[in-house]
Each structure stands twice: as C-alpha cells, then as structure tokens.
Amino acid sequence: MLRGIGVLGAALTALLIGASHARAQAVVSTPALFTSTGTFACAVVNLTTTGNIAPTISIVDGATGGVLASDSSAIPPGGEGEVEYTPGAVKRAYCTASFVNNTEADASRVTLMLRTTGTSPGTAYAAIRGVRTGGSSGSLVTTPALSANVDEMVCAAVNTATTAQTITLSLIDETGTVSDSFTVSVPAGQVKLVLLSNSAVVRIRHCEVTAASQNLARQLRVSLFTRTPASDPNDPLDSYAPVEGY
C-alpha cells in the first residue's frame, strides 16, 4: 500500500512539474520612452516557421509598473501583432512580450514605437527594440552617444527584476566627465531617469548605468534619448532618437 502511494506520488509530482514547464514564460522587455501627444505601440514579429504564436503583449506604465494595455491574439508565421495605448498626457512607458518558451521569444522581434496622432496618425517617429536578456559589461550598462541643443537629454532605466534594485545613472560628456548623476532605488517593473536640461549650446552625452552585479545589470533595459521641451506647442516632452544601452 505504501509502495503504491509512492508510485502515485511520483506520478503526480511528474505531472505537476510538466504543467509548470508548460506554463513557463520567456519575457522580452524594451527600454522606456516618453510621449504626451503620441501613441505607444508595441509590435511583435513572428519569425517562426512552425505555426502561430500568441504572446501576451503589454504596454507598462513606467511610473507605477501597472499594465496600460495588453493583448494576446495569435500571430501567424511572418506576421505581426501589436498593442496600442494613447495616454493623452505625459507618460513614460515600456513594452513586454511574454512567450511560452525561449525558442519562441528568440525567434520573434519586439519593438516599442511612438506614433503620431492627429490628422495623419500612425507614422512612427521613435522606436527601440526589446530583448530577453540585457547586455552589460560587468555591472555596467552603457549607451551610445547622442547630441542635443535646445532639447533635454534623458537616460532612463527599466528594472525588469522581480525585486527593487539600487542603480546609479550618469550622463558623461565628450571629455569623459560626469555631468549629471543620480543614485536611486528602482522598484520592480518601474522606470527611473536622469536628465540634462536644455541649453543654447550643442551637447554630446552618453549614459552609464551601474548596478550592484552583472546579473542585476542584465535585468535593466536602458535608453538614452532627446526629449522636446515642456514648452513645445506640438509634442511637449516626447522622446526622439532613442538608443539602447548594453
């Protein structure tokens, strides 16, 4: 009798483990962008050749970690699926796409873009890709450089980890000098940033984000972009020319 229970227990354990594996998900996350008058759109391209995929595509509020819009419709091989969200006010957001396994995730391409609204809606004016595992050099994530004149320059970091982590965001000028730096605790699923305010001279900057370890650094999604002034009558505080940290 005890022996029978042992066999039954082992079978039940194997079944539960199999179910757990079936539910396992691989998440691709993008860095964050800002918009006030545009539309966030998260797009997934299915590059598999074996059939439809149905990832859960979500646009996430960077200030709270809450989901702003989400969908999980089927995407055919070679096809594209997407989710849109128009905030109507200044919003920082990023995109996640949850797949059933790493194979599907790695055979897909995920993009967060900003689209125009108004009389000619739909044109993308900023876009940045998503990745499943972030790149880093040890505990450091570094972006390429950008330049700006009257626009602000913003470095933003998304924490995709399940717990908060403390990071330092630094903007570095062309001489290698830190011009602006900010150390902050980033809750899970949220976005923190450091910015260089606008001025009347051209500035060149890249961004460095330092985490406590390489593992934590790889759970960050870092973007550097220019941002229009708050006084801009057309698209105040919108992201332009984003580059990705790695």
Image (spheres, helix red, strand yellow):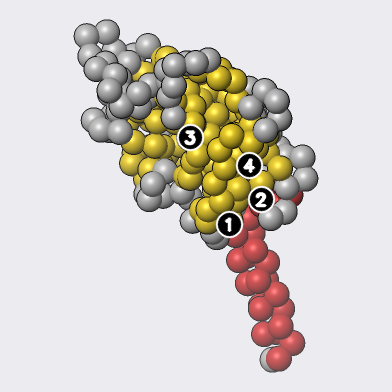
Quarter where residue 5 is shown: bottom right
Residue position for label 2: 211
Categorize mark 4 by other alpha carbons within 10 Å: few (<14), some (14-19), many (20+).
many
Residue position for label 3: 195
Categorize mark 3 by other alpha carbons within 10 Å: few (<14), some (14-19), many (20+).
many
Question: Could you tell me how far apart the alpha carbons at marks 1 and 4 are, in whole angstroms?
Answer: 12 Å
Q: Are marks 2 and 4 in contact (CB under 8 Å)?
A: yes
Categorize mark 1 by other alpha carbons within 10 Å: few (<14), some (14-19), many (20+).
some
Determine whether the residue tagged by mark 1 lies in a helix, strand or loop: strand
Q: Which mark is residue 43?
A: none
Q: Are marks 1 and 2 in contact (CB under 8 Å)?
A: yes
Residues 114 and 101: in front is 114
Indicate which disc, 2 or 3, sits on the residue closer to the N terminus.
3
Q: Are marks 2 and 3 in contact (CB under 8 Å)?
A: no
Q: Nearer the viewer, mark 4 or mark 3?
A: 3
Q: Give percent across and percent down for residue 123.
A: 37, 11
Residue depicted at 65% across the width and 63% down the height? 17
Residue position for label 1: 165
